[in-house]
Image (spheres, rainbow, N blue to C red):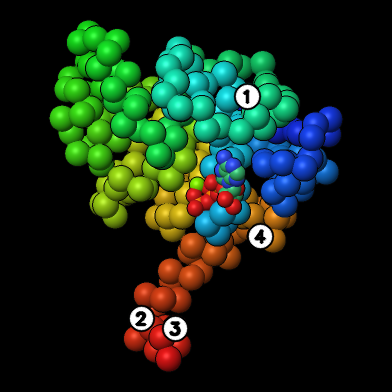
Amino acid sequence: MTFIHQIRLDQQHDTRRYPFTLPVVQHLIRNPIELTKPVTFLVGDNGAGKSTLVEAIAVAAGFNAEGGSQSFRFATKATESSLGDHLTLRWGTRKPRTGFFLRAESFYNVATEIDRIGEGIHASYGGKSLHERSHGESFMDLIAHRFGGRGLYVLDEPEAALSVKGCLTVLRHMKELVDEGSQFIIATHSPILLAARDAAILEITDGAIDEVPYDAAEPVALTRNFLSEPDRFLRHLLD
Ligand SMILES: Nc1ncnc2c1ncn2[C@@H]1O[C@H](COP(=O)(O)OP(=O)(O)OP(=O)(O)O)[C@@H](O)[C@H]1O
Ligand SMILES: [Mg+2]
């Protein structure tokens, strides 16, 4: 069960500028994304357009473009593209009770906003200012204390803050949250996070978006290859 069933992009805009020039955005005009599983991963190389898409989805879903809850309305610097204004999300009848948008690059600003809103709010984030926690600790506080059941979570590279063990802990929290009716949309490079159950992996290759099985997803296949023979890999890479 998902809150957002489909993401569509209508063709009525200036296609000569970013983000409409991106191949993946062009692809989206012709091919809506269907969200059939509680967890949807977006994978693809650096620059493939994952953050652009994830951010647009978050904006279309009513989140602040810089991250946070739907009620956060702060802005430090407008870098978001206008893609979100052009996306059409098809919602199911069930509505999320809560949610969060984690924009990898501006978690710091979210922590500042939580501090600004005041002391009372810290309880929902583990009882401490997130500025007094390490990057990974603050993300753990967020998922353990702030995320709840029936939530919509849009996350951009949550693994950026996390150790391998941290990623495994996140998998456990994700499973609980999904069991409690939550939906996740996550851009990631982490072969560990990609192992989440009940997930669809959408891979962006040459601007096209295709669903791939876990073992075929590039972060998984390439990491597995590398780890099986790092020396051979390095020789190949460096010689
Ligand atoms: N504000 C912007 N103006 C113009 N081009 C941009 C802007 N933001 C991103 N781009 C370009 O759009 C492309 C996609 O960027 P995006 O950040 O969505 O990639 P990504 O898939 O998230 O990559 P990564 O894995 O490195 O995070 C990149 O080539 C980038 O240079
Ligand atoms: Mg990105």
Q: Are marks 3 and 2 in contact (CB under 8 Å)?
A: no
Q: Residues within 10 Å of mark 4 (few under 14, many from 20)?
A: some
Quick one: 108 or 54, which is closer to the camera? 108
Q: Nearer the viewer, mark 3 or mark 4?
A: 3
Q: How busy is the neighbourhood of tag 1: few (under 14 within 10 Å), some, or many (20 plus)?
A: many
Q: Is residue 192 above or below residue 56?
A: below
Q: Which label number is shown at residue 60?
A: 1
Q: Which disc number belongs to residue 230?
A: 2
Q: Earlier in the sequence, mark 2 or mark 4?
A: 4
Distance between the Cα atoms at labels 3 and 4?
22 Å
> Mark 3 vs mark 1: which is more N-terminal?
1
Q: Residue flagged by tag 3: what amino acid is it?
A: Leu
Q: Which residue is mark 3?
A: 237
Does residue 142 appear anywhere in the picture?
Answer: yes
Q: Residue 151's x, y, as percent?
A: 47, 23
Picture disc at residue 161: none
Q: Amino acid at mark 2?
A: Pro
Between tags 3 and 2, which lies in front?
3
